[in-house]
Image (spheres, helix red, strand yellow):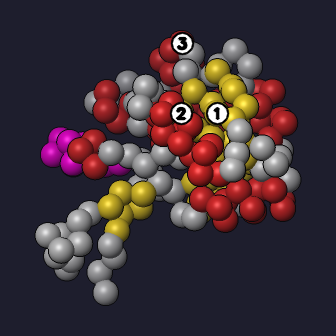
């Protein structure tokens, strides 16, 4: 057990490493589905841009080609076609839901297998690995704690690898 009075719950993002998908191909496939903007680095500044965009809706930061690309404003028709309708809106609009349903499954057609998708907790490590492997890092913004709690109260399971909780029990 963890004393959350002394060590408050922290919800962190888990980033994706898409092996075999260079950033140039990932960006080209987004045309007509999402807005894409190049974002200036360094990494902390790019993450600030991600946080600002995430406050308004689904947003991701792509890296791996030496620069950063903000991906946001998904096409509503794409989401209606790809995201499960039998879940609450809070689940349907999670970045992890949109990433897996719309981007990985539909737009990029990446198989959900360890040889294609890696899950990385450390942001800088995700970027470094993507650059080294000519892959795409999808940097995520953390889910707000109140969203996690709301879905839990409804008995709805979060999408796989959508959150990293801390502190961890000793």
Left or right of residue 53, residue 19 in this image? right
Write down the quadrant of residue 31 in the picture.
top right
The residue that mark 3 highlights is 77
- Image quadrant in which you'd find residue 30: top right
Name the element at disc 3. Answer: helix
Question: Does residue 1 lie above or below 129 as drawn?
Answer: below
Left or right: where 122 falls relative to 110? left
- The residue singled out by tag 1 in the image is 70
Identify the magenta region. 148-158
Residue 130 percent location from the top left of the image: 76, 56
Q: Residues within 10 Å of mark 1 (few under 14, many from 20)?
A: many
- Asked if the stretch drawn in magenta spans residue 81, the answer is no
Question: Which residue is pictured at 51% across the width and 21% down the height?
Answer: 79
The residue drawn where x is 48% and y is 17% is 80
Regarding residue 78, the answer to whether it shows in the image is: yes
Check if mark 2's residue and mark 1's residue have beta carbons within 8 Å: yes
How far is disc 2 from disc 3 in space, using C-alphas?
Answer: 17 Å
Which is more N-terminal, label 1 or label 2? 2
Q: Nearer the viewer, residue 119 or 80?
A: 119
How far apart are the two marked residues, 1 and 3, measured between alpha carbons? 20 Å
**Residue 55 rendering spot, x and y as whole percentages:** 41, 31
Instruction: Work out whether mark 2 precedes mark 3 in sequence or the reverse, and give the earlier one.
Output: 2
Camera-nearest residue between 40 and 12: 40
Front label number (1 vs 3): 1
Residue 59: mark = 2
Crowding at label 2, few (<14), some or many (≥20) Cα neighbours within 10 Å? many
Where disc 1 sits, the SS reads: strand
Say which of marks 2 and 3 sits in front. Answer: 2
Mark 2–mark 1 Cα distance, whole angstroms, equals 7 Å
- Residue at image point 73% right, 31% down: 38
């Amino acid at each position: 057990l963890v004393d959350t009075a002394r060590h408050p719950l922290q919800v962190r993002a888990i980033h994706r490493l898409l092996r075999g998908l260079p950033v140039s191909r990932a960006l080209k496939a987004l045309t007509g589905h999402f807005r894409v903007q190049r974002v200036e680095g360094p990494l902390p500044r790019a993450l600030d841009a991600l946080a600002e965009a995430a406050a308004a809706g689904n947003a991701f930061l792509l890296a791996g080609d030496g620069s950063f690309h903000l991906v946001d404003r998904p096409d509503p028709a794409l989401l209606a076609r790809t995201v499960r309708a039998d879940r609450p809106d809070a689940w349907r609009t999670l970045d992890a839901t949109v990433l897996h349903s719309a981007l990985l499954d539909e737009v990029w057609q990446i198989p959900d297998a360890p040889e294609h998708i890696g899950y990385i907790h450390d942001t800088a490590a995700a970027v470094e690995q993507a650059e080294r492997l000519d892959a795409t890092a999808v940097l995520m913004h953390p889910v707000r704690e109140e969203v996690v709690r709301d879905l839990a109260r409804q008995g709805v399971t979060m999408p796989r690898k959508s959150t990293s909780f801390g502190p961890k029990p000793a």
